[in-house]
Amino acid sequence: MERKEISKSVLKRLPGYLSYLKSIPHGSVSHISATALANALGMGEVQVRKDLALVSSGGRPKIGYPLETLIDDIEQFLGYDNTTDAVLIGAGKLGQALLGYSGFATYGLNILAAFDIAPSSEPGEDKKPIYHISELASFCRTHKVLMGIITVPGEHAQEVCDQLIACGIKAIWTFAPTHLDVPPHILVQYENMATSLAVLSMHLQAQIKEKK
Amino acid sequence: MERKEISKSVLKRLPGYLSYLKSIPHGSVSHISATALANALGMGEVQVRKDLALVSSGGRPKIGYPLETLIDDIEQFLGYDNTTDAVLIGAGKLGQALLGYSGFATYGLNILAAFDIAPSSEPGEDKKPIYHISELASFCRTHKVLMGIITVPGEHAQEVCDQLIACGIKAIWTFAPTHLDVPPHILVQYENMATSLAVLSMHLQAQIKEKK
DNA sequence: TAGATTGTTAATCGATTAACAATC
DNA sequence: TAGATTGTTAATCGATTAACAATC
């Protein structure tokens, strides 16, 4: 398959398709159409078809896309077939929740270990070790880690970010609600709960006003 | 202030401005320009100025926007000044992490209680109670809750979603990686870690290929 | 064959960026 | 006054949607 340029908007929709396709009982259907997929996810069918055209090895008119092949195509495109190793900084509640979540394996993500200034929790609990932050650099180097997950309070996020970059990390996934300054070629992905809350809050305000 | 129509794109950027403005030491500066704000957040200054024009009560050329007033304007616009009560369904690790996070108060969000099929954890720990799911309906009705947070596994998300709607909830914040079918006027906001991972994964793939 | 569906090309829509006049 | 900055109007850009030919 030729790898075409793909926009971020399309990229963000792919996991949704994948998740739905995988939820279809194994063996129940052999093919699925863009129309069916669009209806299930409440989307426009043209958009789905156009998105799939970018990643799939092709569907057949009247029949649709072969289910298993389509799943494989999307997974391969997203790189879920080869796992990415990551380190997590900040073993608070959220950090430990992510550390213990086994579902990331589905997305090709493997959190090797967590680091914290006070690694209090017994490491055995979730099988994943929690080290002191001072061991971060050597760990990243020996394991050639490319991805870092930041779950420390906002005021320490930039500092942790700088450390990660110094350790050779190329992609950062941050749960801290602060902007991170990074050099080019380093990608920061903000998991920003505040933006979601803004959208929800605005919707509820409108609802309440409507009622009045 | 006249409340104009605001797009979702603008809405999603507002929390970022707010967070940065609040991080400025109290009393250190009285005004801030769109230029300064843009530089700090790595954005275009025109975009910042245009966004602020929609929510602020006005800045002055050469001087900028009065800091305190701007913060108030954004908070008021986002509705952070009057708190929203919410219930959380699914007291697993993630659920408990959210339940125990005190930072939501800043966004006007107040999680009243959590519900689970097996409310194992001792309620006293985080001060927030964890009830059995059977008590959800009466609780929502008596407290007039409008927002529900879903942190159950994907396979139970739709079921929980339906229950919440039956209880009168108008906005749903879901952490489950599945599409939810809802009637119109109900807003679903997906906190989809899978989309973030897709973006990160794609970046790393490109990085690795570049190296070869 | 007829009709559903794919995939592509063109049109529309919305959001971002650029240009510029107004102002302190 | 000069220059930085605001706020608005116009131009560009990108993404979504519509139209349609190809195909099974």
Image: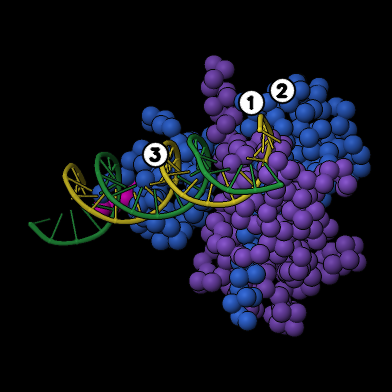
Chain colours: A purple, B blue, C yellow, D green
On whether residue A193 falls in the magenta region, the answer is: no
Q: Earlier in the sequence, mark 3 or mark 1?
A: 3
**Which residue is drawn at the image coordinates 28% and 46% (left, top)?**
B60
In this rendering, would A53 be left or right of B93?
left
Q: Which residue is labeled 2 in the image?
A: B168
What residue would you read off at disc 1? Answer: B184
- Mark 1 belongs to which amino acid? Pro
Q: In the image, B28: left or right of A108? A: left
Q: Nearer the viewer, mark 1 or mark 2?
A: 1
Q: Main secondary structure of the magenta part?
A: loop
How packed mark 1 is, by other alpha carbons closer than 10 Å (few <14, some 14-19, many 20 or more), is few
N-term mark: 1 or 2:
2
Q: Is residue B111 visible?
A: no
Residue on which disc 3 sits: B54
In this picture, which residue range is highlighted in magenta? B62-66
Q: Amino acid at mark 2?
A: Gly
Q: Position of residue A165 (x, y in %)?
A: 60, 75
Secondary element type, mark 1: loop
Q: Amino acid at mark 3?
A: Leu
Chain letter of the residue beneath label 3 in the structure image:
B
Residue B71 is tagged as: none
Q: How many residues crowd around disc 3 within 10 Å: few (fewer than 14), some, or many (20 or more)?
A: some
Q: Position of residue B108 (x, y in %)?
A: 60, 38
Figure quadrant of the N terminus of chain B: top left
Q: Determine the residue positioned at 57% across, 38% down.
A: A199
